[in-house]
């Protein structure tokens, strides 16, 4: 009988739960909500192997997932995307976007992203109490992905609510239906507008691939936009928000970064390791029996690969539960591994480096405006992120305004 994981604790403080599961073995049968049984892979080596194992597929097949809530058409328009596809569909879809997010393409965006970061911080008054999630960590990656896709500036405020409901998925089924229908209708309307009047943006490019080369169905086009929008801002927002929270609760590390900016890239990696924004990979489905350690996962089982747990595995990381910027060489699984490795990793890393440098340039120090224990984690078993991050910043002397 699989044990039920305590979802509230999994959301607020998952690490002791994962440590206990890792101590028992590399994979365990658990329920993440009543009646939903999965196999959870928790140790680093086995998680990495599972992510690259073709016997564990991403396509749920026969309309599973939220089809019972939203109906087949909306379900497909939300979900016929890379993270729910296997080769050859996955290979075809990934080819269509990988060029747009390649290292060289993305590096060219650096000056524009830096300007955007400075403009957002300019709007904050010195000494003002602000929610840095609302005023910085969310708008920065949201503006970037919307700009790349060609989402009109006036529509971007819509995504916070949509996102909140969509990441809580099965935990808010009623609201999910309304939001998913509204989001799909929005993307379809925008597609019609861009089809009539193409612009220099990724959505117009995808439409022309759809219309000229017939390499993308209508549902795949909508699902691609939905995936890029959410994957593009939700995760990066939490890298910025949670990463800043980690620095504020480890002030010596903030000081170390201010003293030596060459540490920023390693700091971003340690933030990703320590608080992986995606708690688990997307579900995998066992196409055949799969052996993980001494556990045999049966055909048809749902497998969740716990990235947060793998990133804290004591078998791989010395002082695994310490947040330590000096940990320069430890790679992690926060971007996944194998054919689904995050397409946006170069962009997310660039945004992370730019955002933290902009904050370090501007602020001598930043303090939490509430005790850390008052902060709440968003209710999602997929995304790890704070609900808000109220802070007060003291501007660096060299930047103080009159
Ligand atoms: C800190 C920020 C980010 C994190 C932690 C992150 C994490 C991940 C992870 C773990 C996966 C693989 C999931 C799995 O195997 O089930 C993934 C895939 C993906 N990510 Fe990201 N991501 C981030 C930012 C971005 C950005 C900025 C974009 C936008 C371009 C993006 C687009 C994607 C896409 C399209 C996939 C699917 C790739 C595929 O299936 O081939 N991500 N991401």
Image: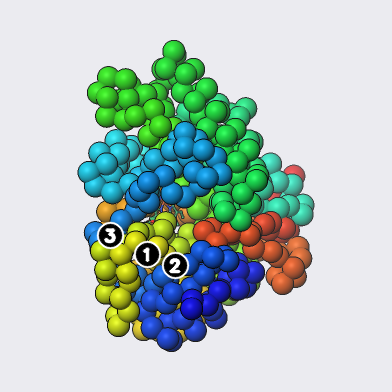
**Whether residue 275 is visible:** no
Using the image, tell me which numbered label, if any, was put on residue 93.
Answer: none
Disc 2/disc 1 C-alpha distance (Å):
7 Å
Query: Please, what secondary structure does the residue beneath circle 1 have?
Result: loop
Disc 3/disc 2 C-alpha distance (Å):
14 Å
Instruction: Choose the circle earlier in sequence order: 2 or 1.
Output: 2
Residue drawn where x is 49% and y is 84% of the image: 20
x, y (%) of residue 346?
Answer: 36, 50
Q: Answer with left or right where residue 254 lies relative to residue 387.
A: left
Query: Please, what secondary structure does the residue beneath circle 2 have?
Result: strand
Instruction: Choose the circle earlier in sequence order: 1 or 3.
Output: 3
Using the image, tell me which numbered label, if any, was put on residue 301.
Answer: 1
Q: Quadrant of the C terminus?
A: top right
Numbered circles on residues, count? 3
Q: Is residue 237 shown above or below 116? A: below
66 vs 312, nearest the viewer: 66
Q: Which residue is mark 3?
A: 287
Disc 1/disc 3 C-alpha distance (Å):
8 Å
- Say whether marks 2 and 1 touch (CB < 8 Å): yes
Q: Answer with left or right where residue 262 lies relative to residue 98.
A: right
Query: Please, what secondary structure does the residue beneath circle 3 have?
Result: loop
Q: Answer with left or right where residue 113 lies relative to residue 92.
A: right
Residue drawn where x is 38% and y is 34% of the image: 220
Q: Residues within 10 Å of mark 1 (few under 14, many from 20)?
A: many
Q: Which residue is mark 2?
A: 38
Q: Answer with left or right where residue 114 lies relative to residue 155.
A: left
Residue drawn where x is 31% and y is 30% of the image: 216
Residue drawn where x is 43% and y is 38% of the image: 76
């Amino acid at each position: 009988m699989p044990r039920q994981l305590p979802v509230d604790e999994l959301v607020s403080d998952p690490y002791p739960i994962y440590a206990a599961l890792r101590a028992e073995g590399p994979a365990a049968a658990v329920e993440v909500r009543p009646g939903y049984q999965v196999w959870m892979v928790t140790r680093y080596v086995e998680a990495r192997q599972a992510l690259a194992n073709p016997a564990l597929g991403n396509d749920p097949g026969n309309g599973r997932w939220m089809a019972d809530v939203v109906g087949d058409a909306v379900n497909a328009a939300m979900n016929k995307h890379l993270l729910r596809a296997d080769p050859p569909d996955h290979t075809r879809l990934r080819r269509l976007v990988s060029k747009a997010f390649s290292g060289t393409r993305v590096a060219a965006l650096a000056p524009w992203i830096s300007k955007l970061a400075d403009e957002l911080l300019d709007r904050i008054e010195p000494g003002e109490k602000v929610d840095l999630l609302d005023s910085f960590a969310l708008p920065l990656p949201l503006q970037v992905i919307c700009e790349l896709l060609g989402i009109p500036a006036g529509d971007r405020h819509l995504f916070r609510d949509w996102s909140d409901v969509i990441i809580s998925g099965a935990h808010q089924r009623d609201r999910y239906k309304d939001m998913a229908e509204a989001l799909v209708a929005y993307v379809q309307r925008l597609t019609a507008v861009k089809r009539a009047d193409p612009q220099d943006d990724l959505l117009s490019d995808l439409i022309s691939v759809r219309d000229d080369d017939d390499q993308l169905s209508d549902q795949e086009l909508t699902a691609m936009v939905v995936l890029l929008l959410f994957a593009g801002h939700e995760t990066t927002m939490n890298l910025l928000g949670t990463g800043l929270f980690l620095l504020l609760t480890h002030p010596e590390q903030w000081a170390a970064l201010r003293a030596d900016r060459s540490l920023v890239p390693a700091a971003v990696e340690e933030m990703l390791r320590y608080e992986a924004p995606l708690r688990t990979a997307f579900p995998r489905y066992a196409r055949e029996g799969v052996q993980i350690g001494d556990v045999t996962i049966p055909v048809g089982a749902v497998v969740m690969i716990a990235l947060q747990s793998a990133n804290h595995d004591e078998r791989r990381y010395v002082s695994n539960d310490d947040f330590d910027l000096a940990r320069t060489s430890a790679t992690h699984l926060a971007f996944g591994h194998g054919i689904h490795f995050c397409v946006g990793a170069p962009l997310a890393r660039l945004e992370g480096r730019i955002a933290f440098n902009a904050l370090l340039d501007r602020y001598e120090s930043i303090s939490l405006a509430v005790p850390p224990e008052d902060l709440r984690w968003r209710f999602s078993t997929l995304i790890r992120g704070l609900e808000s991050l109220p802070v007060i910043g003291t501007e660096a002397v060299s930047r103080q305004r009159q």
